Image (spheres, rainbow, N blue to C red):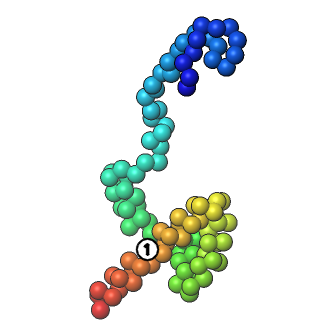
Amino acid sequence: MAPRLEIAVGLKRGHPTIKNKLAPRPASRKGLQTKHNKFVKDIVREVCGHAPYEKRAMELLKVSKDKRALKFLKRRLGTHIRAKRKREELTNTLAQMRKAAAQQK
């Protein structure tokens, strides 16, 4: 920002001031994934399993209906970006399940 001058009119009018450097608010950390959060989420997922809508989406992904799965998830989750993120998560889960099944054989 241009230096302010002690003048009454114009773009640079007023007393010369400096912007304060504010500390980040605690709310800016909301949703950040920590080690503990990840651990808790993994435990909950392991104990509770997947929600019914997630199971249905996984079935769609198994038969290569990616676009239909995205549309279904979008209706359930509300936004396109959330649906894309969830589809990616479920795709990774399916890949891990396939990998685990292949190692058991």
Q: Nearer the viewer, residue 23 or 47?
A: 23
Q: Measuring from the top left, give residue 26's x and y in whole percent.
A: 45, 35
- Please say if 8 is above or below 72: above
- For image coordinates 47% across by 43% down, the residue present is 30
Quarter of the rendering containing residue 46? bottom left
Q: In the image, 64: left or right of 44? A: right
Is residue 50 among what the camera can see?
no
- Please say if 39 is above or below 103: above
Quarter of the rendering containing residue 48? bottom left
Is residue 99 among what the camera can see?
yes
**Mark 1 = which residue?**
93
- For image coordinates 54% across by 12% down, the residue present is 16
- For image coordinates 53% across by 64% down, the residue present is 85
Determine whether the residue tagged by mark 1 lies in a helix, strand or loop. helix
Q: Measuring from the top left, give residue 13's x and y in whole percent.
A: 64, 13
Q: How many marks?
A: 1
Name the image quarter holding the C terminus. bottom left
Q: Measuring from the top left, give residue 56's x and y in whole percent.
A: 58, 77
Task: Count residues near mark 1 (Cα–Cα under 10 Å), then give few for <14, some for 14-19, many for 20+.
Answer: few
- For image coordinates 56% across by 23% down, the residue present is 2
